[in-house]
């Protein structure tokens, strides 16, 4: 290293360690490509030793406090702190770990920890501007086979979830042939679902649903075909979004709406399935779900498992789109929304759904994903509710000083 480079490195380290009272040093640096303007980026990891009196403390940072800084190379712009990490074991098991991967204009941060229930999460962050591209989480039990996972892609504004609970005897004892312990695995079809985006509130003005909502189509490319064969994606589509704890908007487009038939089952309709109680550790012992149907004229039929806790339902047809709003008396728990498409008023041609639903099986219901923690996740453009773009990195790294 030349003298000039040495002095530059020493100056940078002094800048990044300014104000620290414990030994502090740069332990690793990564080239991070360029931003959109072509400026070179670099990430520096700074390690700050634990205070002497804390070094034997089981909950001290391991191996010390870690800080990650973003530098704009060959500019006058001062480096900024992206995140600070203190791995104190991240839970009673003491297995905590952070991983950092740097790619061009991208940082991938993974973290794991827990106790009997273990968890890990992974965030993919754009560096400049500092935004979240995607996030993934996984939780599992260290002593039994239950697990659940979720992943959300902010660039496509879509995500999916999966879960697995063990099979049990009617008395609640685990079946030996299902007692496999491990990390989050591959979900069976019955354990998979589309994540319905959940907002803090709906806009007050009228809108139809665009990219801010989960898309379900007749081909099964988005969502699930749970009855009948997959067809053309545009034969019938459904978009779904949630607001608050208990309100939903559903937009259905169909190449041929069937408003009535000799039986409601063979007329076009929506079905909403809800958990009748908390899901337990034994999938096959879950209480049966509740079902109700919404007909094209907005009327409600209670169909299976009891009375659904509905507060209000409105249904209108607007420019060829069936626009349905429903509000429950309280949080619905796990849910699946199904559109039943019949082109001839005699048969159910196809059922498309937000999860890989099986009739009457609570363990096959899906869930929503809160996307609006900082507000502004969606906006109305040309009368449609659209995703507003990638969120600020502060969504997952509140301590970041990148503004």
Image: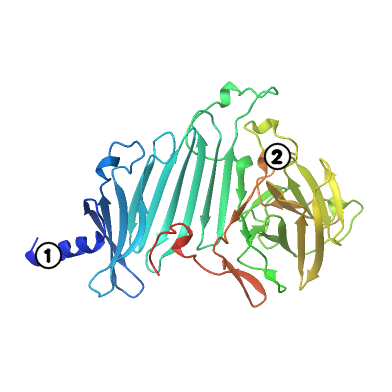
Mark 2 vs 1: CB contact within 8 A = no
The crowding category of the residue bearing disc 2, from other C-alpha atoms within 10 Å (few below 14, some 14 to 19, many at least 20), is: many
Q: Which residue carries the number 2 mark? A: 362
- Looking at the picture, how far across and down is residue 118, in whole percent? 48, 37
Residue 299 lies in quadrant = bottom right
- Looking at the picture, how far across and down is residue 225, in whole percent? 68, 50
Residue at image location 79% in from the left, 64% down from the top:
256
- Looking at the picture, how far across and down is residue 243, in whole percent? 67, 60
Q: Quadrant of the C terminus?
A: bottom left
- SS at badge 2: helix
Left or right for 26, reference 155 = left
- Does residue 327 appear anywhere in the picture? yes
Identify the residue at the far front of this view: 53
Q: Which residue carries the number 1 mark? A: 7
Left or right for 311, reference 48 = right
Residues 402 and 380: in front is 402
- Looking at the picture, how far across and down is residue 37, in whole percent? 34, 75
Residues 346 and 299: in front is 299
Residue at image location 36% in from the left, 44% down from the top:
87
Residue 306 lies in quadrant = top right
């Amino acid at each position: 290293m030349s003298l000039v480079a040495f002095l530059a490195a020493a100056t940078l380290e002094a800048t990044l360690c300014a104000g620290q009272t414990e030994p502090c040093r740069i332990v690793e640096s990564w080239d991070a490509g360029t931003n959109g303007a072509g400026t070179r980026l670099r990430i520096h990891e700074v390690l700050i030793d634990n205070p002497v009196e804390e070094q034997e403390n089981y909950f001290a940072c391991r191996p010390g406090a870690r800080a990650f800084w973003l530098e704009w190379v060959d500019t006058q712009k001062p480096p900024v702190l992206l995140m600070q990490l203190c791995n104190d074991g991240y839970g009673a098991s003491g297995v905590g770990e952070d991983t950092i991967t740097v790619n061009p204009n991208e940082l991938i941060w993974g973290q794991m920890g827990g106790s009997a229930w273990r968890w890990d999460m992974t965030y993919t962050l754009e560096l400049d501007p500092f935004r979240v591209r995607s996030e993934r989480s996984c939780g599992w039990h260290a002593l039994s086979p239950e697990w659940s996972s979720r992943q959300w892609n902010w660039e496509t504004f879509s995500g999916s979830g999966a879960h697995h609970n063990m099979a049990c005897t009617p008395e609640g004892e685990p079946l030996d042939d299902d007692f496999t312990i491990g990390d989050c695995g591959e979900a069976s079809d019955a354990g998979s679902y589309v994540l319905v985006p959940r907002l803090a509130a709906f806009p007050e003005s009228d809108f139809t649903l665009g990219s801010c909502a989960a898309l379900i189509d007749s081909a099964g490319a988005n969502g699930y075909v749970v009855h009948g064969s997959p067809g053309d994606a545009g034969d019938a589509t459904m978009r779904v979004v949630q607001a608050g704890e208990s309100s939903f908007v559903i937009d259905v487009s169909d190449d041929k709406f069937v408003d009535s038939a000799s039986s409601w089952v063979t007329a076009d309709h929506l079905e909403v399935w809800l958990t009748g109680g908390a899901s337990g550790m034994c999938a096959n012992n879950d209480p049966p779900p509740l079902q109700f149907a919404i007909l094209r004229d907005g009327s409600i039929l209670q169909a299976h498992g009891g009375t659904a806790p509905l507060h209000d339902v409105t249904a209108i047809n607007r420019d060829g789109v069936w626009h349905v709003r429903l509000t429950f008396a309280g949080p619905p728990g796990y849910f699946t929304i199904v559109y039943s498409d019949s082109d001839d008023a005699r048969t159910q041609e196809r059922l498309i759904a937000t999860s890989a639903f099986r009739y009457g099986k609570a363990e096959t219901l899906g869930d929503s994903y809160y996307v609006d923690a900082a507000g502004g996740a969606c906006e109305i453009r040309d009368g449609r509710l659209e995703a507003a773009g990638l969120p600020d990195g502060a969504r997952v790294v509140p301590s970041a000083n990148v503004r």
